[in-house]
Image (cartoon, rainbow, N blue to C red):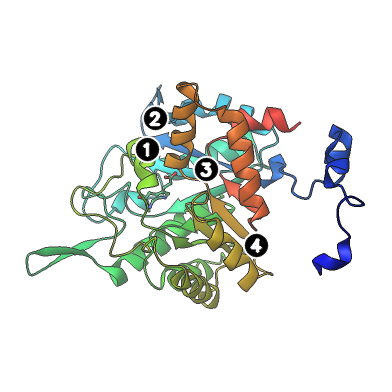
Amino acid sequence: MSVTNLGQYPDVRLRRLRRTPALRKLIRQTLLTPNDLVSPLFIKEGRNIKTPISSMPSHFQLSIDQLKDEIKTLTSLNILGVILFGIPEKKDSVASGSYAPNSVICDAIKTIKDIAPDLLVITDLCCCEYTDHGHCGVIHQKGNVWEVDNDPTLEILARQAVAHAEVGADLVAPSGMMDGQIQAIRKGLDQSNFSDIPILSYAVKYCSTFYGPFREAAEGAPKFGDRKTYQIDPANADEALREAALDLKEGADLLMVKPAQTYLDIIYRIKQAFPGVPLGAYHVSGEFSAIMAAGEKGWLDPIATGLEVLTSIKRSGADFIINYFNKLIVPKLI
Ligand code: PBG
């Protein structure tokens, strides 16, 4: 588009098209709808639990018997889907609770499918909520340092995927940033006759401070060290493209960038590089909490800010957005 061919002031006045709400709607390019939105849920093993997450207003740790109201609220808002995070009663060093057929997540999938068969159920595949050390894989000691052991973790992730598919998950989303995890999960699913279950890869997951509130909510903070040896350095952009390309080669059906608000350039680049691949973005806990906290102080309007941020994420190239604003903002979309 050549700027010189588009005329100039005073013949051209862009404010003419901003004068009324209808004119602004007529030319609006990015529309956020409930069909773009997925809500995270934190499911805690036990009964009668509905514990507010202090840093994430409107979110709770819920036991399965408390899920019904939450699911009804989400479906009444036409929100497309949920992504589930489990908080088990018992953890061990090898995350064995993560793939048990009666795990809190498997029971939650069954319950949600009973309540709302059409709600898309995505499960997060990772070990950090199930390991007593809080890392995203099994660990071993090398000299005096403990390291996350890539290859033995792959089998655990594949077993999680199969366990979730067996009870009705629609989509599995590995978030642990282990090399080769998509290939291992695809193979595991295919061998168990689940070749029709798609994989949403958190291919581009940065090592972000914005996950802080989530780790409180999901009780999955690492007990020592950090996640720098597996999640991407926030300073790197080209590496994100390489991660995405590798995951596509391994069989990822959809890609995701996480966090979102601080990584719009990455969302844009991934969409440009792989235009045919559906792309999700995860507006993460800390991004949400920061806006809500500023709202509590009266420094900004959290709902209007949430709408602006989610619209920007979509505008930059995301096809769908996992985020914590849904219950607050969807009533404003209609
Ligand atoms: C599990 C996982 C995390 C998030 C999603 N899946 C935490 C982490 O990597 O430490 C973060 C989501 C959020 O902050 O909202 N690996």
Front in this rendered view, residue 149 or 56: 56
What residue would you read off at disc 1?
Answer: 213
Q: Amino acid at mark 2?
A: Ser
Q: Residue at x 69, y 27 (%)?
A: 331
Q: Residue at x 30, y 69 (%)?
A: 150
256 shown above or below 128: below
Q: Amino acid at mark 3?
A: Ile
Q: Which mark is residue 109?
A: 3
What residue would you read off at disc 2?
Answer: 55
Q: Which mark is residue 278?
A: 4
Spatial CA span between label 2 and label 3? 26 Å
Q: Amino acid at mark 4?
A: Pro
- Assign the N terminus to one quadrant of the image: bottom right
Tag 3 secondary structure:
helix
Tag 1 secondary structure:
helix
Q: Nearer the viewer, mark 2 or mark 3?
A: 2
Spatial CA span between label 1 and label 4? 28 Å
Tag 4 secondary structure:
loop
Which residue is outermost to the front? 10
Spatial CA span between label 3 and label 4? 24 Å
